[in-house]
Each structure stands twice: as structure tokens, then as C-alpha cells.
Image (cartoon, grey):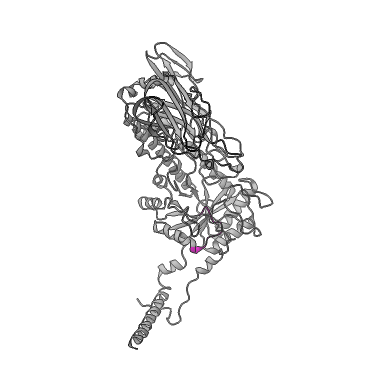
Amino acid sequence: MVICTVLRRLRWIAAVFALLGACIVLGQTAGDPLLRGFQNPPASARPRVWWHWMSGNITKEGIKADLEWMKRAGIAGFQNFDAGLNTPQVVDKRLVYMTPEWKDAFRYATTLADQLGLEMAIAGSPGWSESGGPWVPPSQAMKKFVWSETHVEGGSPFTTALPKPPSTTGAYQNQPGGGRAGQAPPPEFYADAAVVAFRDAECDRALRLAEAKVSASGGSFDGRSLSDGDLAKTALLPAAPIGQRAWIQLEYAKPQTVRGLTFVANRVGLSDVELQSSDDGQQFRTVAPIPNGARTIAFPGLSARYFRVTAPTTDPQANPPRPGRGPAGPAGMQIAEFVMHGAVVNRFQEKAAFITAPPLYAMATPAPDSDDVIGKAEVLDLTARMHSDGTLEWTPPVGHWTVLRFGYSLTGHQNSPASPEATGLEVDKLNRADVKAYFENYLNQYKDATGGLMGKRGLQYVITDSWEAGTANWTDAMPAEFQKRRGYSMTPWLPVLAGHIVESAGASDRFLWDFRQTLSDLVAENHYDQLTDILRARGMGRYTESHEAGRAFIGDGMEVKRRADIPMSAMWTSQPGRTSRQFDADVRESASVAHIYGQNLVAAESLTAGIGAWTFSPETLKPTADREMAMGLNRFVIHTSIHQPSNDKIPGLGLGPYGQWFTRHETWAEQDAATRTPPRRNACIPPATSFA
């Protein structure tokens, strides 16, 4: 009985304190700005959305309905992308990017956004990555360096046309690439950069002169083709029977000392590829693994007669037929190059920025013998001796020489995913003049489209999305830019860019570090920093993402955001009940930028999903949102709110496989406004009462 009485009194006391607590909170409503801010946040604290216009499916009726819903739902602004992901046409007439009809619709959206007080931004290009379009000429597009190699005997005049380096558009040498399926291939461009010569290292010359017999577990191979530098021409090494390994082998008449390998092959679905050696052709030992994606590896010197690359059985499921792309190719590897080296820079293609994110700290070049490296003073600059037709006039000193002709061609990267009419080459991000020409042209298009409503009102920001433009490692003034930033000439070190060791293994690796740092400086200064200056001259600002996850370009994500008005990042979310596809991306990086460089806003492309269309709710999204805020975010930019041109096609258009599907057609789209109603005041407490 006593226990029951005590429990009743405790419940009564708890009820009194609960009532008092509620009254305290309610009493603070009128005078507490923090509480008022939570109940009715200012525009600076409200979310924005990405607003994709898909493949010309645009109507003024849909624009009006979308923007009025955003205002009603408490969204403070939008970032517009004109995109295309094979979206079906659902309107009577497509509005093609920057046609008069498209501009009329965009001007209507700009005017209405201004009237509604919505912040407005556009992407840095049609599509979302990165800065490119059909107005970019080939000479101003992203570039890579290329080279050709000629061996010359000294002691007599040499007047011969040097082989022209590849002008092929693609990622590396003459491997083709770039462009989009169903469209014309991107154009080609080529310009010369430099010509240098150096005395041959004896170890490499010995290997060149040694004839190697080629054999394999299957297929037909020609030794000359495997060492001619033509990466577009391949031969098939068929997959081995189950339980066996396929192999291709070089056999020399006598043992050869080697310290490296170049092996270029299409290795779809294959891992556990390795180089082996043997003295008798019967007993083989492993020399080194060949990591997936690696073209050239180096290792401590060894001597053997037989060198073999082996690969496991191909999984038939690793190369299945793909819809719309024809049947799968035969199982196995398409091999272009198989060359042994006396001395070579380990993974020089990755270190020279042909690939974006290698684990460079694990790629130091093993030191060869001092006789097998090129002396820096022995590298001769012959650039002035080559005529415009490629003819070199030179009398080399007695000895054996290698001449490298360096040039540059296009990577072929295009802005995407844009409609075909808005797709073109990505601008050279390393070249200040080219970047300026690109953005002035782009912004002038929008000046026309907005009727000049840009700056403090109307169109206010440009958002540069996470980088999906691949790598570029050359620009027109690269030698001069390198000299200015690093304090020494890159000319004596140019052979390193083709894999030759100059001075020492460590010195060559350090040069490549400086080379990449120069690329990083150029993209930060000439693309991102300059964009801030261009925008501020128009009264506009910049949101900027960078890598998202991993490392998407040669550069520092914090450096490219340092002058952004609002550093931005990304956070994906998983399908309800799953943990897949959720990753942190670079929210903490952007928060760090804001702290270091004095910005007070940290934004993120938020709640992006790659699975589970129309399966999300505020409840399932909240854990990801909480995680973002815990990492420093204070401005959500919800990915994504696709423009819905009509009301009779429900649930409406999406961004291909990507969400959020957060549009006015979402079933809970109108419930947000109701949740922001201030709580009712308890009548027991007068409005002016305070318990402070």
C-alpha cells in the first residue's frame, strides 16, 4: 500500500515537471530567436534542390508548378542542370538547349524564381560535369602528352623525319577513346612540344638487339607487333581450360638482365596476372604481380632466358553480353604490348597523370645500376633543330642515341550527361585563356537566356559538380608553367615522362611528383580560382564540389574549393533497410575548407540514391541527414528534384537510375509545409510569462 502511494506521488510530481517544462518551452517561443529559427528557419538555413531539365522535356506549366511547390514546401532555391540520360520524350515538342524556345522557358523560370525569392544557380556546363560544350574548339580542349621514339647511330649527319607522335583522341598514346555512344567520334588535334635526345643505356640497348621468340598457350603473336608501340592493334590470348592458366612467353637465346616490363592488354574480369621467369623454360618463379590497370612495372634486377605473363581462367560471367552493345567478345586477353626493360620508371604512366588515383607511395622505382641511367647533363634539347614537317637535322656524337619527339593531343572527354545538341569537348582546365573563353561564352549564353537578370537577383550562382572529366596532363604552355612554379626546367627530365630513368630512380620519381604538383596548381588556379573572379565580375558566386569519393583528378580538393563562396560536397544514401551506396564523400573536407578559408556555409549534394526509386521517406532519409550534419554540413542541396513538365504522368520523370525522387509528385511532397507550423501555446501560461 505504501509503495503504491509513493508511486502515485512520483507520477504526480513527474506530471507537474512535465507540464512546467512544456510551459517553459512554450513561454520561450515569443522571445527565443533560436527556437523561432528552428520553427521558421531563414532562407540561409533552408535546403536547396538540384532541378534537372531532362532531354528537353520542359513546359512553362511545369516550371510554374515546380517552383511554386518549392516555395510552398520551404525550399530556398534550386540549381539547374540541363541534362540528358536517354529520357523519353513526354512533351509535344522538345525544347532544345539554348534555342529560342528553350531561352524563353529559362527566362520565365528566372523571372518566377526572382519573384518567389528563390536562390538560383546553374551547373558549370550542360549535363553536370565539368566545363565543356559544343563551342569548345579542339585546340582549347583537354590534352595529354604523346611521344615517338627513334634510335639513331651517331657519328654522321642525321636528316630524317621523326615519326609523328599519335594524334589519336583518347586517354593514352594511340588508344582511342572519348565521345559518346551513338554520336560522331570527337575530333583530333595535334601539336609538337619538344625534341630531346640522350645516349642509350646499355641494358636497354642489349634488350632491343636481343631477338626473342614468342610463344603462348593459344592464339598467334608476332614479336615485332608486341614491341612497336601500337596500342590499338591487339591479338587474343584465349582463356585456358578450367583449372589451368593462359600464358604468353618471350624466350631469349641467352640470359638477359631485366628490371621492368610493359604489358598492355584488355583484362576484363581478370585479376591475379603475374610475370614469371625461368632459366630452363620448365621451372618458373614469380617475379612480380601485374596490378589491374598497370601498364609498366619495375622490380629489382634479375637475369633469365624465359619471361612469361600468366593469367587465370576467365570467368565466363566476367564479360557478359551487354544490351545494345552486341555480344560479348571471346574469353581471354587482347594483348597489344609485351616488352622487357633493362631499366624503367615504375608505373610511370600513373605517375605522369594518365590515371587519376594510384597509391603512389607504394610505387617507388627500384634503383638500377648507375651505368643504366641517363645523366641529366647528357639530355640534349633538339627542339630548334626540327622543322615543321618533323624533319630533324642533327649530327649526333659517336655512340647510340634515342630521340624522343614529344607532342600533345586530345583526351576526348566531353561534358556529360547532356543532350546531344549540348555535348562537346571539355575545355583545357590547365589553360587560363581557354578557361576564360569558355566561361565568358557560357555565361553570355545565360545572360541572353535570362534577359540579363543575373547577379544579386535572378541567376546568382554557378555550381561545379564533382569531377567526372578524367585526367589531362598537358597544356600549351606546360614547360613555362613548370619552370615558373618549380624553379627549374623540365626539358632535361622529359625522358622520364616516357619511362626512362634520368640521374637516378629517386630523382626521376621526384620530378614526376613536381610534374603532378604543377598540374594540381594549374587546375586550382586557372579553372577554379579564375571562375570565382569571372563570376564576381558579374556579381555572382560559386558552389564547388571536387572529388566526391576517391580522387577524381590530379589535384587537391581543398585547394579547388578555397575560393568557393560555398564549398560543397556529396553524401549518398542507401535504400531503406540496406547499407549499400552510402558513403561520406567529402563533407568533412568541405567543412575543413570553410574553417580554414573563412566561409561559414558547408553545402552538400545530399541524399543521392542509386537504387530504390520512390521508396524513400523523411524517416528513412533522416539517418543520412543526421550523419551529414555531424560531419559539418549546414546547407542541404537535395539530389534531386527533376523538372516535371506535366501533371498527368505520375510519378513523373527521373534522372535515369539516380534519386532522390523528391518532386511535387512525391506522395509526401505537400506534407513538409504542415510540419513547420509553430506549436500551439498552452492557455495556462500568459504570453509574457517567463520562467527564466
Q: Is residue 187 above or below residue 450?
A: above
Which quadrant would the N terminus be assigned to in this image? bottom left
Q: Is residue 613 magenta?
A: yes
Q: Position of residue 240 (x, y in %)?
A: 50, 34
Residue pushed farthest top? Answer: 156
Q: Position of residue 179 (x, y in %)?
A: 56, 37
Q: Is residue 117 above or below residue 276?
A: below
The rendered magenta stretch, by its main secondary structure, is classed as loop
Decide which of 326, 352 is in the foreground and name it.
326
Which quadrant would the C terminus be assigned to in this image? bottom left
**Mark count:** 0
| Numbered range of the magenta stretch | 609-619
Residue pushed farthest left? Answer: 370
Q: Position of residue 690 (x, y in %)?
A: 38, 77
Q: Is residue 110 magenta?
A: no
Q: Is residue 397 above or below residue 11?
A: above
Decide which of 122, 502 is in the foreground and name it.
502
